[in-house]
Amino acid sequence: MPADASLPIPPALDQLREQPGVGPGEVAGLLERLAEVPDPRDPRGVRHAFAVVLALAACAVLAGATSLLAVGEWIADAPPQVLDRLGVRPDPVLPRRLVPAETTVRRLLARVDGDALDRAVGGWLADRCLAGSGLRGLSVDGKSLRGAARARGRKIHLLAAVEHNTGLVLAQLDVGEKTGETACFQPLLDTVADLAGTVVTSDALHTQREHAGYLLGRRAHYIAIVKGNQKKLRKQLKSLPWKGIPLQGRTRGSGHGRAEIRRIKVATVNNLLFPGACQAVQIKRRRTDRKTGKTTVYAVTSLTAEQAAPARLAQLVRDHWKIEALHHVRDTTFAEDASQLRTGNAPRAMATWRNLAIGAMRLGSVKNMAAGLRRNARNACRPLAFLGLA
């Protein structure tokens, strides 16, 4: 039977404000951010504050929960001190605290506004990005949730923006079945508050004139990989006198069973067939592994030679693949592709919690994500510390 909505129960955020933490001049805490997500329920008979349910789910994923069943089990076993810090209200009759059941969490995550949840989590992570000196890199790339499709659910493809230095996901958007990544590029970056001075990197799919104009309009820069979708531009780049341009950088790397040598040449060209393009880039990669071979990649950038030397351009191109590292961690450590969750917005919400968990641990200087999850699972209070709720 639903509880009486008129019971004198202090809301979770009121309890949070009574505790030392967020001050007037400080950034918003996680509960404040989650309170911005609209509650999809009828307010009559609500037992659990929506922000509290979301925070409990976030803590469970940070403790290693990879399914909604595991999330519900973690919440059921959470000690009183954790529930108290998150603002879980006491039972008006029994000497215990009311916690949401797994079915309640499942229903709410299926109905949550995915865009609002990603804005809240992305804003919380962005507030904690340290402003470094020099150019800031931002990768844009997409990832499909394959498990939902295997469970005969709708195809879910998420486009995300990841900060190079920290690996934090600052924005995420559901592409939708009837649209493509290119249509969501600008709406995704609209949710990032300040792009001025940021270098946006992406794969060749997003080498679009409209994207370049949008970034220049927001005082941002781009490094655009050029392939077959820009045939005239690629032909122009290939025809440049690269043999007469001296080698300007060479790096060697190894890992994951392969070795790679990368060589870069950069030329300043005034008439490139792309909006705002100042420099042409040629990168030659030689890889030694099971598929040994050579690859030549061409790119254009709005950065001038004074703004970015060849070595810096090579680093920005290389750092773009940190978003692939994020996808790898979500797949292997959090078993994202194995999850066949398919109801409503729940698959996207769980992907958002994984982004939050990875970002929170990276902010906490955790290098090994799997070891960090195991450590969090041994003490229910540790996820609170990562999320600034302890």
Image (cartoon, rainbow, N blue to C red):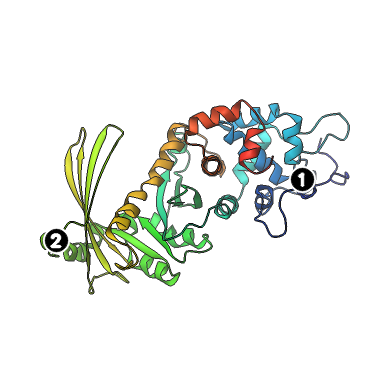
Amino acid at circle 1: Ala
Q: Residue at x 60, y 27 (%)?
A: 377
Could you tell me which secondary element the residue under label 1 belongs to?
A: helix
Q: Is residue 94 left or right of residue 303?
A: right
The residues bearing labels 1 and 2 have C-alpha atoms spaced at a distance of 63 Å
Q: Would you identify the image quadrant in which residue 232 lies? A: bottom left
* x then y, percent, for residue 191: 53, 60
Label placed on residue 242: 2
* x then y, percent, for residue 280: 24, 64
269 and 48: which one is in front? Answer: 269
Q: Residue at x 70, y 32 (%)?
A: 101
Res 191 seen here? yes
Q: Which residue is mark 1?
A: 12
> Mark 1, mark 2: which one is toward the viewer?
2
Res 344 seen here? no
Label placed on residue 273: none
Badges 1 and 2: C-beta atoms under 8 Å apart?
Answer: no
Q: Residue at x 41, y 46 (%)?
A: 323
Sequence order check, earlier mark of 1 and 2: 1
* x then y, percent, for residue 260: 23, 41
> Is 67 drawn above or below residue 44 in the view shown?
above
The residue sitting at the bottom extreme is: 270
* x then y, percent, for residue 266: 22, 61
> Is 105 drawn above or below residue 125 in the view shown?
above
